[in-house]
Amino acid sequence: MMRPRFTFIFLLLLSGLTLHSCGDGKDPDNPVNPGATEPAFAMGVDLSYVNQAEDHGAVYRDKGVEADPYAIMKNNGATYVRVRLWHNPQWVRSVYGNPSKTLYSGFEDVARTIQRSKNQGMKILLDLHYSDFWADPARQEPPAAWAAITTLNVLRDSVYNYTFSVLKKLDARGLMPEIVQIGNEINCGMMMTGTASGFPGLNACNNQWSTLGSIINVAIKAVRDASATAVVKPLVALHVADPKNVEWWFTQATSQGKILDFDIAGFSYYPLWHTTVSLSALPALVTRLRNSLDRQVMILETAYPWTTSNNDGYTNLFGSQTPLEGFPFTPQGQLDFMVKLTGDMIQAGCSGIFYWEPAWITSGMKDSWGTGSSWENAGFFNFTGDLLPVAGYMSRSYQNQ
């Protein structure tokens, strides 16, 4: 997020004819729909801000009853929770002016999110930013602890040891994620902006695929090594922003970067910003990508607004754009968009969709740009904290789409 195969076929099973979701068989431990034998479509929600929002007064309701937001998501069909991890986000304490403030999106906060999610029976996608701050196409700053590194081998060791350590610590607590995402929206690369002189070049847009591939591959190796003796063995996801970039990026990453040991090709799709590939053209792109890579494809971030109004003094990121035809900025329009997108993606062979920050509602929480939320008009809750109809897309049956 810039700050801010499987089709349905009939298989003869035992003595009956049962409808299955056709997957690629790379995730046999993934929970499945009742009666199915293949991985279920991942209904994912990014809840990275929930702990912070709740700590600062956010209240969530379902059918008018105050409830745990993690339970609300689970009860409305969510199967996965995505959570971001920053290396050492000390800036959070500066924002609050409190040297003892919780380091939100730091390790302990993320462990709390994973525990709360797993308590509800949901699986985890851990989004490793490899930064102390937001990582997106425009900003990919290395952690401060690594800023003085000048050799690729030292950086490789740092990335490996950090990734390995995070996962081993989580596994020791019974919190191993089911998916690990290496980097966030790494369109041109990782750790490549605001770098000191001599820092290894990792900018694929400057043809530095060899060094970038070396870093990504060592991170992937750390995931595999950390989970070698674990019960849960995470899948590895890679993530770029905007559908227009995915075919170019994964072609170059596999051919030039020699990045081959990954399981999921992921991308962000915000239709009000990402307009080169239309909603109607997206399914064909997903099918091509899945067939060319022979890997799962997932939308790792998406969202659509339900209103143009706001509920605080923090300017919303959505609202000034023109709505997609047939999908007004209303609760019904938001639901209709997500139903359409999900149905299309299932038919195209996509393996999951993650909605970005559905519970980032107005509260007294702060970030570097404001107090409250710049996303409350694109979440799953209205301005009184009540669940909106959009959440219904996750529990809807798409078998007849």
Image: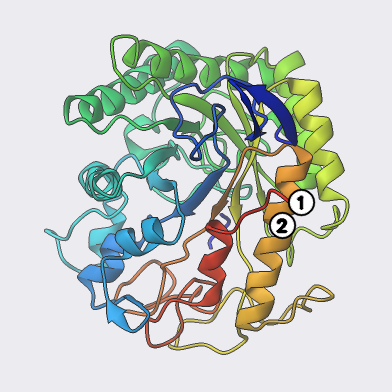
Q: Nearer the viewer, residue 91 or 285?
A: 285
Q: Is residue 293 above or below residue 399?
A: above
Name the element at disc 1: helix
Q: Is residue 278 left or right of residue 330?
A: right
Q: Residue at x 53, y 82 (%)?
A: 315
Q: Name the amino acid, label 1.
A: Asp
Q: Residue at x 47, y 61 (%)?
A: 357
Residue that mark 2 sits on: 341
Name the element at disc 2: helix
Q: Name the amino acid, label 2.
A: Leu
Q: Is residue 180 above or below residue 57?
A: above
Q: Crowding at label 2, few (<14), some or many (≥20) Cα neighbours within 10 Å?
A: some
Q: Residue at x 44, y 34 (%)?
A: 31
Q: CA distance from mark 1 to mark 2?
A: 5 Å
Residue that mark 1 sits on: 344
Residue 200 numbered tag: none
Q: Is residue 5 left or right of residue 71?
A: right
Q: Crowding at label 1, few (<14), some or many (≥20) Cα neighbours within 10 Å?
A: many
From this viewpoint, is residue 33 visible?
yes
Image spot of residue 297 (x, y percent): 67, 34
